[in-house]
Amino acid sequence: MLQEAGFTTSLLFSETGGSMAVGLPLMQLDTITMASMLVRAALIVWEAVFISSFIIEEYRSKTINLLFTYPVSRTRLIIAKLLLICGIMLIFHMGSSIFQHFSIFLLSRQFEFITYSFENLFIHIITPLSTILLGLFPLFVGMVKKSTIATVISSLIIITIASNSQGSTAGLLSVPMLAVIFGMIGVIFSTIAIRKMITSDLYN
């Protein structure tokens, strides 16, 4: 699919009169794929920043004690915070995706070097959801280390792994099966972190 809509490095080199190094594999990426990878990476970091601000920092400074004085269970309060973060990220993903496709489609009509393609709709649905769920993994790291810095750094590690092009030139998260697995990993570790938050002694 990307072969039909994308551009190849060999084509670019032939047009500019350059030459490619022998033995290097051809890379086939269209503009929308590259933009989606960059935005996805940025949003994973933003999700870690929200987790740090809304949850980890409150635990680290023990200001969450005040929140727990309300007649609402810890479980509901923590889940409400996570749902708020996930909701915000879903809006960001949807908004950025619509803006990317609209703007790059218009630019592709004006400039030949900008290419546009629309992949399977299922991929556009499962990838953002899996990215949001995987972005919850830093919650586990943050609760273990009680550190906002560790939370953000773990998101950078996630980006490095998820952007690996071994499984797909668009990153591992663009492969539906791997995206589901990554999402499940995020759910499992965030569940462990939630249990730790519910049972932990805030005064230690």
Image: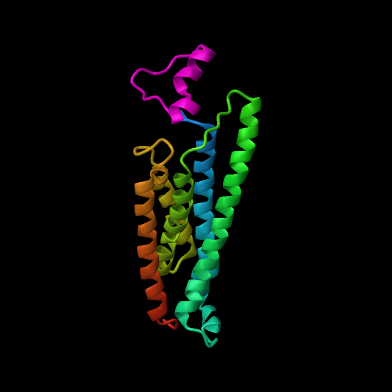
- Say whether residue 90 is left or right of residue 173: right
Whole-percent x and y of residue 23? 33, 20
Look at the image and name its color scheme.
Answer: rainbow
Q: Quadrant of the C terminus?
A: bottom left
Depicted 194 relative to depicted 164: above or below: below
- Quadrant position of residue 141: bottom left
Measured from the top left, where is residue 26 in percent x and y?
40, 24
Residue extending furthest toward the front: 121
Q: Please name the residue shown 59% across and 41% down the image.
A: 100
Name above or below for residue 35 compared with residue 183: above
Farthest top residue in view: 17
- Magenta range is 1-27
Q: Is residue 181 visible?
A: yes
Q: Position of residue 159 (x, y in %)?
A: 44, 48
* Residue in front for this viewpoint, 128 or 68: 128
Residue at 46% over, 26% down: 4
The residue that appears at 46% across and 41% down in the rendered structure is 120
Q: Is residue 57 visible?
A: no
Q: Is residue 16 in the magenta section?
A: yes
